[in-house]
Image (spheres, grey):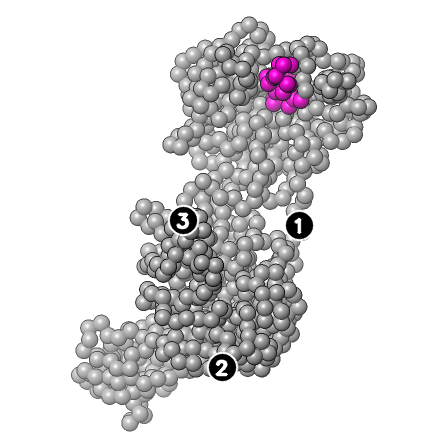
Amino acid sequence: MRLSRAVGAAALALATSIGALAAAPTAATAAAPAPGGEAVLGAEPGAYAPEVVLHAAGKGMLLRERRNGQPTSWQHADGRKTAADCGPGIAAFGDEVACTSATDLKIRDFSTGATESVPAVANRAWGNAFSPTQVLATEKDARGWSVLHLLGRANEPRKDVPVTGSGPMSTYAVVGSDARGAIFEYWNPAEEGGHGHRYLDYATATLRELPRPSGVDSAYNKVALGSKWIAMLQFDDVVMVSRTDPSVVRPLSVPGPKQIMPVGDWLIADTTRGWDDTVSAYPVDGGASRPVLSRLDGPLVLGADGGAYGLSTAVGSGRWAVNGISADAQGAPRVQEALPLPTRPSDRRSIAFAQGDLSALHIDQTQSVLGYRVSVAGPLSVAQAPAWRCDTSPEDPSCQHAAARQGGNAATGDGRIVGLAADSTSCSGGCVFTAYVREARTGGAHRAIKLPGAPQWAGMETASGRHALIRVRENGSDRLLVLDIDAGKVLDVKPASTAGLWGSLLWQPEGDKGVVAATDLRTGQVTRRVDLGSGCRPYELQANGDWFYSTCSAEVAAAAAYHVPTQKRIPVPFIAEKPHGAVQLGDGYLAHDGDGRLDVYNLRSGTAVKEHRVDEFAAGGPGIGFAVDRFGGRLAHLAQDETVHVVGVTGSTSPLAVIDQSVPGTLDSRSATGRQARWWLSKPASSWKLLVRNPASGISTVVRTGGETRGAIDLTWDGKDQSGRAVGNGSYEWTLLVNPADGKGGQHSTTGSVTLSGATSQAGRPTRP
């Protein structure tokens, strides 16, 4: 089943029974451009029907959009599009639209532009049906029965004709109409006729009772009006009644149709089953059915030409359009495209963003995760074609879980994404939660790591490199878990109730005076302490390099950012409605999701300055509607139209740093596979170089170089230099030089030592570092 962000009103059965359809407000004005630059990732084309509902079909089509806040509009194949702003009541047939909630009935012909007003009559309400010469009005008599009138339009001399025939009606609805008449479904007390259908003939102003199912004390399930026949459905049995001679009746057997519509001497029926979406035409006089549409979305609508129109795909075509089914010169059904429609984008969910690599869950006919590349140097841009993807399938059933919506997801900043999913949609009694880790590349390795216990809830807090921080709730209590992604296990670390994760450091409150301490997850030792200047034990804590965000209570008291190099505490000018997740810390900025808006506060000047606001975005919190690139200084948010906007922040990012490393202390060059070394970076690099220096001789040798790198520098050193010559045995000092891709902060240098053995020749030529 397709999941939709915006919930549209139910599609109505027939064009003339639109009823009290409220005109949606116009779309909000576009947000001002972000001062730090903005790039837009276009929506991905989907296979599902455009999210519109068809209400009337003439030379143009009356359509209502279900998801973008657009009003009902008349659209023509030549591109004309005009809003049909009628307020809460609207009726339509062909190209004419009547505003039934107005005091005087306003009618507009959208094909010609002609307008007309029918004066109101005291104590009468407008009905949802009209003809080229008359309009329907109703009033209540002394007993509360509905009394119908046909009021003449400008070209009709009979200005008020009472409708006669049949019995009383307590309440009714128009379920179908054309230029000659209308079908009513009515409800009365049981002793007054109960529930049934009647046909109103405009020419004679008479109301005629339609047949009821034999042996059943109720009305037909569905009734549809065609130019020659009235179709009445009860389960799998259809009775066709001639409009000109009610004594002419034709029975048909159709397997459980969802929609029916007579066209000429054929019945169009949507008999969709799980394995077959085909819409077929059944001859009224019996015989074999014919397929006419591959798929139908929403109602079949009676057109002004007597054809049946629907949002559909024709047989042999996957393109969605408004297609019309009519009878050709020989009376056989034919299908013609009446109005092409733009492709509906696939739904996007669960975005993750790190080191300029953006990913999103796409929901269409299957669930897929697609990854995109954002520029990390020069002008802000985003490549429109996916750089990688995975598709949920029997061969890869866990693809979508890496971008999980239930427990959230995060990008690790080293080319992986991790998401949480439960084994059930209801976890009140506890669930098995699993972390799904996937390399962000087509065909990338993936693994599943089960969390301990049976939590009632689990959510992704953050991820950084080889670690992820997860919050779980079990037996009414929250606790944090630290997941070692590489080892595939939960570490034997018991974090405080709040913590921040950055590289190999787990930051936690220490005492109740605003001090936080960093535990190196590689050694278990506290290596740093920072006084945030809050004077309280942090209730919420986030860490991003030299930046921190903290609050003092669940009510978000004393919310502030802190910058370590300047030792400056920066209060924030807002109240975060949700204690966890409403605010996300980036590199020198905060993203605040509050009251349906996303605000970006720039902290880099030492003061929280609201730099950008997004009024229309797909709310849902971090990892759903927006994502902060903690390793690059930008953020991304998902718009209602399924586009993704990548926003820059003005000012300088923090200097590049190595935030975690895994480097061997000894290396035997005789090993066939060499030894693996890895350095995790705080932001993308434009280039890097690894040198080793012999302390005794002072000779330095370049052993590896690389270009643009996002996330981590990985290499397997076999004890040889770049020319393939072995470096001599002995102890060496290594130096990694890394240049930032954004040019901010200068070259970074980090050093260490390694002992090399097993070499068979002398060191390579010395090079200048």
> Predominant secondary structure in magenta?
strand
Q: Nearer the viewer, residue 399 or 672?
A: 399
382 left or right, relative to 145: left
Query: x%, y% of residue 252?
Result: 45, 14
In front: label 3 or label 2: 3
Q: Which residue is mark 3?
A: 424
**Residue 651 visible in the shown view:** no
The answer to whether 528 is drawn above or below residue 362 in the figure is below
Query: Badge 1 local density, few (<14 within 10 Å), some, or many (20+)?
Result: few
Q: Nearer the viewer, residue 465 or 414?
A: 465
Residue at left offset 50%, top offset 18%: 233
**Residue 645 visible in the shown view:** yes
Q: Secondary structure at mark 1?
A: loop
Label disc, if present, on residue 529 of the rendered structure: 2
Which three-letter amino acid code belongs to the residue tagged 3? Ser
Q: Secondary structure at mark 2?
A: strand
In front: label 3 or label 1: 3
Residue at left offset 78%, top offset 15%: 160
Which three-letter amino acid code belongs to the residue tagged 1? Ala
Q: Which quarter of the figure has residue 91? A: top right
The quadrant of the rendering that contains the N terminus is top left
Q: Which quarter of the figure has residue 571? A: bottom right
The answer to whether 375 is drawn above or below residue 152 in the figure is below
Residue at left offset 63%, top offset 26%: 17
Query: x%, y% of residue 311?
Result: 52, 32
- Write down the region rendered in magenta: 171-196
Please check the rendered image and state whether residue 285 is part of the magenta-colored stretch, yes or no.
no
Q: Nearer the viewer, residue 478 or 18?
A: 478
Q: Secondary structure at mark 3?
A: loop
